Amino acid sequence: MSHPSPLPVSASSAAPASPPLLDLIGHTPLLPLHFADAGCTLYAKAEFLNPSGSIKDRLARHILLDARAQGRLRPDSIILECTSGNTGIALAMVGAVLGYKVRILMSDTASVERRHLMRHFGAELQLFHTDRGYITGIEMAERMAAADPRIFLPCQFANPLNAEDHFLTTGQEIIQQLPGRIDAFVSGYGTGGTLNGTSRALRATHPAIKIVAMEPAEAAMLSGESPCCHSIEGVAGGYLPPLLQGVHVDWPEKVSSAEALAMTQRLSREFGLLVGTSSGANVVAALRTARKLGPEARIVTILCDRAERYYSTKLFAENPASSV
Ligand SMILES: Cc1ncc(COP(=O)(O)O)c(C=O)c1O
């Protein structure tokens, strides 16, 4: 991770170049999870341990520190992003410690806890209603930026720095944490940044690795189907993002909302993991990949975020899987 050169230090205020909180981002453990019923062990990157609770802290730090170093963020700048939630929480946190105003455009279907967390970090929220997925919010952000020169758009869906950071950090961490063979990497996609950057890093070291894209069975766009409503927040937002184009995916693995919710509950009850629904979905897809590749296969997947942003969702219903 490259950090910008230090800020000039005045006698009265000695602000550090990069607030120490930002050093807590990344370097997450790779947890071996043994599934006795499937006879295999998966390796799960514990991204829920990032300080704001999700993998999105990585892109927020990388994009904002880069923008600050390039002079694209000024004291009166407003960071504006369209996000299903986790990126908004991460930008609000990193924006707060760097001293910038953050405004978030979010679909009104995202959980209410995400709104609370963003506001708690001091961000402004604007909710929109759409049946066109992320596209509506992306177009709104572009219109607002055209009308106000203070606005800085991180553009998580198209910004190559999003994927670059996963190439430089997530991918390299996995390579160091799991020496020897890695047979497959399994991940869902929202912006496609995780799949893009991490898979490029892993393939460079493990050329035979299989890259498996988890997608909701109800919105299996890589499988050529039309997007529809699903309960796996944060992934497949009705749109195939630019960062996913050109990513070498060996095959997509469809996971239903009911399967994802049931596995997420199992992860908390059997493994003590307080994680969100896309983590359960990734594990379902990784176990299917283990069935295809054999029990000895060394498969890495991602536990994307923490469960506290799902209290009001089906995940915390009495019987999550049957509530779909
Ligand atoms: C909970 C969750 N899981 C997975 C992802 C997918 O990550 P990426 O945007 O890197 O494709 C996201 C992204 O929004 C997310 O919020």
Image (spheres, helix red, strand yellow):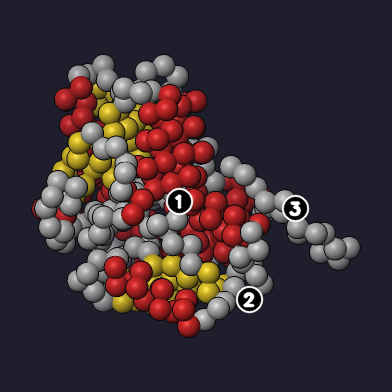
How busy is the neighbourhood of tag 3: few (under 14 within 10 Å), some, or many (20 plus)?
few
Q: Mark 1 is on which residue type?
A: Pro
- Quarter of the view holding residue 181: top left
The secondary structure type at the circle numbered 1 is: helix
How busy is the neighbourhood of tag 1: few (under 14 within 10 Å), some, or many (20 plus)?
some
Marked residue nearer the N-terminal end (3 or 1)? 3
Q: Residue at x 31, y 44 (%)?
A: 246
Q: What residue would you read off at disc 2?
A: 76
Q: Tell me how far mark 3 sits from mark 2, CA to CA.
A: 20 Å
Q: Mark 3 is on which residue type?
A: Pro
**Residue 286 at what x, y percent from top left?**
24, 33
Which of the two residues, 245 or 177, is positioned nearer the viewer here?
Answer: 245
Q: What residue would you read off at disc 1?
A: 160
Q: What residue would you read off at disc 3?
A: 6
Q: Residue at x 26, y 69 (%)?
A: 109
Q: Tell me how far mark 3 sits from mark 1, CA to CA.
A: 24 Å
How busy is the neighbourhood of tag 2: few (under 14 within 10 Å), some, or many (20 plus)?
few
The secondary structure type at the circle numbered 2 is: loop
Q: Is residue 145 left or right of residue 232?
A: right
Which of the two marks, 2 or 1, is nearer to us in this view? Answer: 1
